[in-house]
Amino acid sequence: MRGSLYWLKRNESLLLLAIFLLALFIRTIHFLEFSRTPLSTVPVVDEGTYHDLAKGIARGEWIGEYVFWQAPLYPYFLGTLYIFNENIYFARVVQLIIGSFSCLLLYFITKMPFNRPVAFISSLILAIYPVMVWYEAQLLPPVLAIFLNLLAVFLLLRGVLFFSGIILGLSALTCQNVILFGLATFFWLLFRKRGFALLFLFGMLIPPLLITYRNWVVGGEAIFISSNSGINFFIGNNPDYDRSTQVRPGREWERLVGEPARVLCKRLTASEENRYWYHKAFSFIKEDPVGYIKLLIKKFFLFWQSYEIKRNIPYQPFKEDCSLLLKFLVIDFRIIGPLGILGMALLVSRYFLLRKKYKNLGFAKITYKVYFPMLLRRRYSIFYIFVISYTTSVILFFVTARYRLPVIPFLIPFAVSGAVATLSFFKKRRLRLVLLSFLALIFFLTGYKDFDKNKDKGDLYSLLGDAYKKRGEKIDAISAYKTALSFKPEDAETRCILSELYFEDGLLEEGVKNLEEGLSFSKDEMVLTMLGGVYRRMGKPKDAIIYLTEAIRVFPSYIIPYNEMAMAYLDLGELDKAEKIARFVVENIGYGKENPDAASILAEIYSKKGEDRLAREFQEKAMNLEGAKAR
């Protein structure tokens, strides 16, 4: 054993270089694999949002005009890269390099509280951890957040508290969940180094407070970091958790985000929207505390099960259908999760042996006066603090693979310890403990079966269709959308996009058939509205009105079917009915007053009625609204 330790120490630099090169090699192979898909050149979902923000920053829009909606550091990081090279591949390559350096940082922060063998194995596992490899090729915050978290802990363990706090504050501008870890670390430092803890806290608060001040200057509201915390809290704390967490960007997301304005019938400031969502979530918690407790328990198990819950591009179906490398990299959460819990439990359990030494004290006194102080003095307690605090912060909101990922580097050393302990039990023939360990592993290996893998596959092919469509590759887009519908035929948005492509190619019959097929799965207002619009343009306004009436019944605050119906009555020459519907839109539906189409329809109606003054008034209004919309 001593010989092995001496060899590791003597060859440390060489081994670290090997780990770095291995990490970079694996990430490069994945990058080349990923580059074969259209998703590598067309940022989708949150990637698209960050990409667009970064392009604006690269053009010089550093301050911005509005309160930050999301944590802002990652788009600024991306924008800085785009100043040098706006090629999207350049940003992805830089992230691969950062991810490879994260493996080295994990070695250094693990070596101090654990030992060199555990540190070496941990950094090696991080180098080949497939979900880490996957996300480091995505234009998403985890790669930067993980690097900053590891750097902050590296500085913390070396006593550089002020700069450690600043780095952690920057990490909070990338992923706000880490704030809870920062506060827990502050109290840990109070226990260990009372006078220096304030240095860490002061450093940690500087970046978030600067951004809060910027929000106040730009938007007139002192919003802490970003304004999306309220809606995220609601998404994870409501009676329909499964549905709300699966809402995709597009129509469903826009409808959710627009709910406060629709309900309150006015434009809201960022802080007002935040308060609306927090109020709605806390109303659920107050009215159904038992349901809320059950939801927290559910989220706890969702966090620790093995399936990678999607939030952007679904990882699991991409691995199965598009990547040989990710299939080959088998050390994932199915192994790290249960072994990590086992390792954490075993490291803690040794302190319960203190009960034999302090027989005269009760359990509470042993725990409070002896057990916790000894545990907190251990350097690896910072790993416990990160895992527990970060897990808690995710469970308080909602669980996805992307939000779970930052805990992985801090869980891996525990997993290595758990694996070593399991081997030790086996050698000493403690078969009961070995059996329990493997039963836990089997539980996590099979825990993902409750997830709807077909829906995730459908989402992947929908995103592939979106990417092909943006690249102008219609045939491939149609093929991808048809594959998506084979997995989730109830997806109305994908069905409507597919029909649009059919209509563009003059395949009217196929487009209508596709939409009517969708109605057999659900009476969706978007499908009904599109069918109504198609029949109106086919010169069948009476058939159009049937579908549009049903669309309005399904979703009364959806403006488009009203406008289409007004046009259908206009085609029939029933001007009074057309006027009544268009007026209803303008006077009663949310943003109807600001809808240029409704104003334009009214202008046409009044023109046909011979009421020239009203026709000119609404035509001018329509033009002004179009101009405002363009701005």
Image (tube, rainbow, N blue to C red):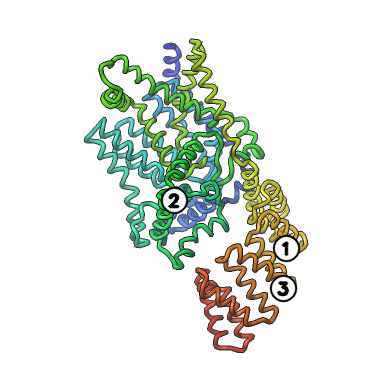
Q: How crowded is mark 2: few (under 14 residues within 10 Å), some or many (20 or more)?
A: some
Q: Which of marks 1 and 3 is in front?
A: 3
Q: Which amino acid does label 3 sit on?
A: Lys
Between 407 and 215, the one lying in front of the other is 407
Q: In this view, does 464 lie above or below 408?
A: below
Kindly indicate the quadrant of the structure image that contains residue 540: bottom right
- Give coordinates of residue 472: x percent, y percent: 67, 56
Q: Mark 2 points at which residue?
A: 284
Q: Position of residue 394 (x, y in %)?
A: 44, 41
Callout in the foreground (2, 3): 2
Decide which of tag 2 and tag 1 comes sooner along the chain: 2
At x 50%, y 71%, the residue is: 628
Q: Position of residue 473 (x, y in %)?
A: 69, 54
Query: Does residue 491 appear left or right of residue 98 in this picture?
Result: right
Please tell me how crowded label 3 is: few (under 14), some (14-19), or many (20+) other residues with Cα within 10 Å: some
Question: In the image, 489: left or right of 228?
Answer: right
| Element type where label 2 sits in the image | helix
| Residue at (44, 38) in percent of width and height | 146
Q: Please tell me which residue is depicted at 43% across the width and 59% down the height of the picture.
A: 61
- Within 10 Å of the Cα at label 1, are there few (<14), some (14-19), or many (20+) other Cα atoms? some
The residue type indicated by label 2 comes to Phe
Q: Which of marks 2 and 3 is nearer the N terminus?
A: 2
- Labelled pair 2, 3 in contact (Cβ < 8 Å): no
Q: Which numbered disc covers residue 542?
A: 3
Marks 3 and 1: in contact by CB < 8 Å? no
**Mark 2 → mark 3, Cα distance in angstroms:** 44 Å
Q: Mark 1 points at which residue?
A: 503
Cα separation between marks 2 and 1: 44 Å
| Place of residue 71 in the rendered image (x, y in percent of width and height, measured from the top left) | 42, 50
